[in-house]
Image (cartoon, rainbow, N blue to C red):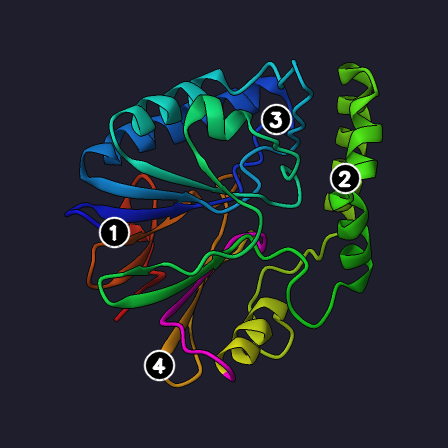
Amino acid sequence: MSGGSVFFLSDFHLGIPNVDESRARERKIVGFLEEIAPRMDTLCLVGDVFDFWFEYRHVVPKYYTRLLGTLARMTDSGISIHFFKGNHDLWTFGYLRDEIGLEVHHDAWTPEWGGKKFYIAHGDGKGPGDKGYKRLKKIFHHPLNQRLFSWLHPDLGHSLARSWSDQSRVAAPSDESFSADNEWLYQYCLRKLEHEHFDYFVFGHRHLPIYTAAGESSLYINLGDWIQFQTYAEFDGKCLELLQYPDQSLAGYGRGR
């Protein structure tokens, strides 16, 4: 860090449920990013920024120009932006890195800021459960399967992906409560702490703002989403807060050490 804050956001799912609502959400996100940019050193986009993203050799999705343009201006100004692949936008092969200037993470990243050690990941496929998705994830990540998918016409590929995305949301758990015993990502944090200390675990994927102790001296933070909650986290070099846009005072989710 060089004086500014580190911000964490996840699960925009741009593209759903339709063009108009997605564009309105995109405008809100862009407005927020432009508002916080003057005090930002680093931005972490912790997965599922897009509800579907696939880069063909010469074709990228036609939407999201407001967000992509904003991110490009931010990286041009010297802000470091880290993009974590989620389970909905894992198929990026260089465009976001080369054209927009994002540093793309295929899995967890463990930086240190202000003497605090972070473990950052989208969170899909981690923890003791979800074995069906873990098998499916291996299929999605296999280079041969990605190449075969790239041979489909983009319109057909997009339609198939949207269909799968809709089905995955229907099959997802509908509960909106936190239970330590049943929270796979929380259990994953406890297992990691048996071997290595982290001050903060920061995940997306869950679509539920969570801020709770993990072990004796660590915190588990889930960033919620920008479909329902508009929540994000800010680390100012001393402590980590989970906040809500636009009225931060109403969030009340938590303040870290």
202 is within the stretch colored magenta = yes
Q: Is residue 49 above or below residue 7?
A: above
- Mark 3 neighbour density, 10 Å: few (under 14) some (14–19) many (20 or more): many
- Mark 2 neighbour density, 10 Å: few (under 14) some (14–19) many (20 or more): few
Specify the label residue 217 is tagged with: 4
Specify the label residue 143 is tagged with: 2
Find residue 230 and report its horizontal and vertical position in percent.
43, 42
Specify the label residue 249 is tagged with: 1
- In the rendered structure, which disc, 3 or 4, sits on the residue that comes first in sequence? 3
> Which mark's residue is nearer the viewer, 2 or 4?
2
User: What stretch of residues is rendered in magenta?
Assistant: 194-206
- In the rendered structure, which disc, 2 or 3, sits on the residue that comes first in sequence? 3
Looking at the image, residue 71 sits to the left or right of residue 255; the answer is right
* Label pair 3/4, CB-CB below 8 angstroms: no
Residue 179 makes an appearance in the image: no
Q: CA distance from mark 2 to mark 3?
A: 25 Å
Please identify the quarter of the rendering in which residue 115 is found: bottom left
Q: CA distance from mark 3 to mark 4?
A: 39 Å
Q: CA distance from mark 2 to mark 4?
A: 40 Å
Observer-nearest of 13 and 237: 237
Q: What secondary structure is found at the residue carrying circle 3?
A: loop
Q: Amino acid at mark 1?
A: Ser
